[in-house]
Amino acid sequence: MAEPEEVKLEPDAAPKARRRRGPNKARASIEPRMRVLLTVMGTAWKAADETCGGAFLEAAPELAKSINLWAMQDAKLYAWIEGVTAASGPVAVMAALMPVAQAVAYHHLVPAIQRRREAQEAYVQPSIDEVLEYAEEVA
């Protein structure tokens, strides 16, 4: 009987280090872009509501910092904000249209809001006696 051939086994290859996926580059701050976006939004809001829009505009710089810090920790959020606020993105279009939007707002919206406020100030809530008296007249 013949002896079986000796089988040579090769050692397993050393495990390869896994590469991390995603950008390894340092991310640039998106704070200036966020500040522009928030200022555009706040300016439009302030045209309709001085108090709330003004408060938003005051908070915009700190909000931009907070969003920037959050985006620096989340690659997907960073990529989304970077895409939306890119020089050729929606924010650039909004910024280009801002003068038109302000003109329309001050020509149409602000006067309408002022008329509505004046009508609300002129309105006097009738007393219950007046309501009952009117109800008797109508009945």
Image (cartoon, helix red, strand yellow):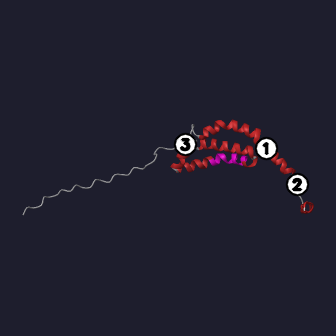
Q: Which of marks 1 and 2 is nearer the N terminus?
A: 1
**Is residue 55 magenta-colored?**
yes
Give the residue number, with chain letter if any, for mark 1. Answer: 112
Considering the numbered disc 1 on the image, is that residue within a helix, a strand or a loop? Answer: helix
> In the image, what residue type sits under mark 3?
Gly
Residue 118 location (% of width, % of height): 84, 47
- Residue 17, relative to residue 85: is it above or below? below
Image quadrant occupied by the N terminus: bottom left
Q: Can residue 29 be seen in this view?
A: no
Q: How far apart are marks 3 and 2 (CA)?
A: 51 Å
> Where is residue 100 shown, x and y percent of the image?
69, 36
Residue 68: percent from left, percent from top: 58, 47
Q: Name the residue under label 3.
A: 83
Query: Mark 1 near mark 2, Cβ–Cβ under 8 Å?
Result: no
- Element assignment for label 2: loop
Q: What is the CA distance from the residue labelled 1 to the residue labelled 3?
A: 36 Å
Which image quadrant for residue 106? top right
Amino acid type at image mark 1? Ala
Assign the C terminus to one quadrant of the image.
Answer: bottom right
Task: Identify the mark nearer the N-term, 1 or 3.
Answer: 3
Q: How far apart are marks 1 and 2 (CA)?
A: 20 Å
58 w.r.t. 2: above or below: above
Task: Count neighbours of disc 1 (C-alpha within 10 A) and say few if under 14, some if 14 to 19, many if 20 or more.
Answer: some
Residue 124's label in the rendered image is 2
Q: Quadrant of residue 101?
A: top right
Q: What stretch is highlighted in magenta?
A: 53-63
Q: Residue furthest front?
A: 139
